[in-house]
Image (cartoon, rainbow, N blue to C red):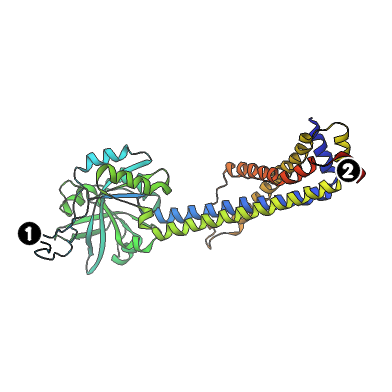
Amino acid sequence: MPFELIAALRFLRDGLAQTLLIIAGVALGVAVIVFMSALIAGLQGNIVRRTLSAQAHVVVLPPEEVARNLREDGATLPLARVQPMAQRLRSVDQWQKVLTQIETVPGVGFVGATATGPAFAVRGDASRSISLTGIEAEAYGRVVDIGSKMVAGRYRLNTDETLIGTELAHDLGVGVGDKVTFTASNGRLDTFTVSGIFDLGNKGANERNVYIPLRSAQALLDLSGGASSLELTVRDIFAAEDVARRINAMTGLRADSWIKTNNQLFIAINAQKFTNTVIRIFVGISAAFGIASVLAVSVVQRSREIGILRAIGASRRQIMNLFLIQGALFGLIGSVFGSALASGFLAAWRVVARNPDGTPLFVIETQPSLFVWAAVVAGLTGLVAAASPARRASGLDPVVAIRG
């Protein structure tokens, strides 16, 4: 082994109590960082999954209709003041071509066309206001995974079939196989058979969302082969707004991402990320000061040994490397024990944090890269913390150091 490593290990062994104390401190710091990072990542993932379980990542819509004031040539005032135009149900112009264009945008996952409009669900004397959505079941199922949320029946949409939410099924008193009549705002109506009942985890969505075949919705909503929106997923959900901007620039259509429609949620997630970063920084600073203080004391305690090493030929560079190696070892060994401790904390959390029905409160996935990152950061922290004591040790005069 190199001379510096042999001497560093000897110094660590001789000051065993100090070594164990600082390694315990680093291990605890690493455990806190890894545990908090995994916990917050799991919490964020759970919130995002619940939020996006009933909606697409990006929705592409026709541009808004705008009423423009008329003016005479050279006039400074408009001839009449025109109120904002009511937004009527319209199809995306040449939506098949636009869908093909969107599929080529970097970061886009799956795309599905929908025909969506207001309607009433009627059964006997019961009537409920709904959002009627026409979909192609196979394509849309890749955008919003309704199939995994079925509580009764099957995720299937033949010509005269419909999928409804649990709350709407309760309000109308229907089950799988029963008939429901949908009446659009234009007066058209049609009767469908309930093929499945879903639970999106949101009472409002379960009361409002109704799915029927795309062609049936086009006829019922008077869209004649059109699609009122294109809904899509993105590979990185936090890049949804960037993807939406690229789609808007390419097509000229409105593209609303989940970040825009759930802005307060996105702000809360960013606040969590910032808090996690601040915790990491302060824990890292605490560990760095602990390592630096132990090594500074070690320089004072071992000044005579350092002087002897210099007298027998050790260079300033070797003395500096000796203390830098000690700092790196503190960080690396502490990270190993800290990662093991964090794994124990996470295992205990999975056992304790459970819903009343026994299911996990939320899923925590520990990526191996998190432990690698913790080891690298702890090692670098040890090196940085050891820099000042190492410079001081390398600058000791051999004669003065030996005399004490």
Look at label 1 and name its amino acid. Answer: Glu
Res 250 → quadrant: top left
- The residue identified by callout 1 is 72
Tell me the residue at 28%/46% (across/down): 248
Dot 1 alpha-carbon crowd within 10 angstroms: few under 14, some 14 to 19, many 20 or more: few
Give the residue displayed 56% in from the left and 55% down from the top: 276
Task: Give the residue type at disc 2.
Answer: Val
57 or 301, nearer to the observer: 301
Residue 354 x %, y %: 56, 59
Q: Which of 117 and 379 lies nearest the eye of the viewer?
A: 379
At horizontal 85% and vertical 31% (from top left) the residue drawn is 313
In the picture as drawn, the residue positioned furthest to the right comes out as: 403
Mark seen at residue 400: 2
Q: Is residue 313 visible?
A: yes
Foreground of the two, 243 or 303: 303
> Please, is residue 83 above or below residue 61 in the view?
below
Of residues 380 and 135, the one drawn nearer to the viewer in this rendering: 380
Please tell me in which quadrant of the rendered image residue 261 appears. bottom left
Looking at the figure, which quarter contains the N terminus?
top right
Q: Secondary structure at mark 2?
A: helix
**How many numbered marks does the figure carry?**
2
Q: Position of residue 200 (x, y in %)?
A: 38, 57
Q: Which mark is residue 55?
A: none
Marks 2 and 1 sit apart, C-alpha to C-alpha, by: 97 Å
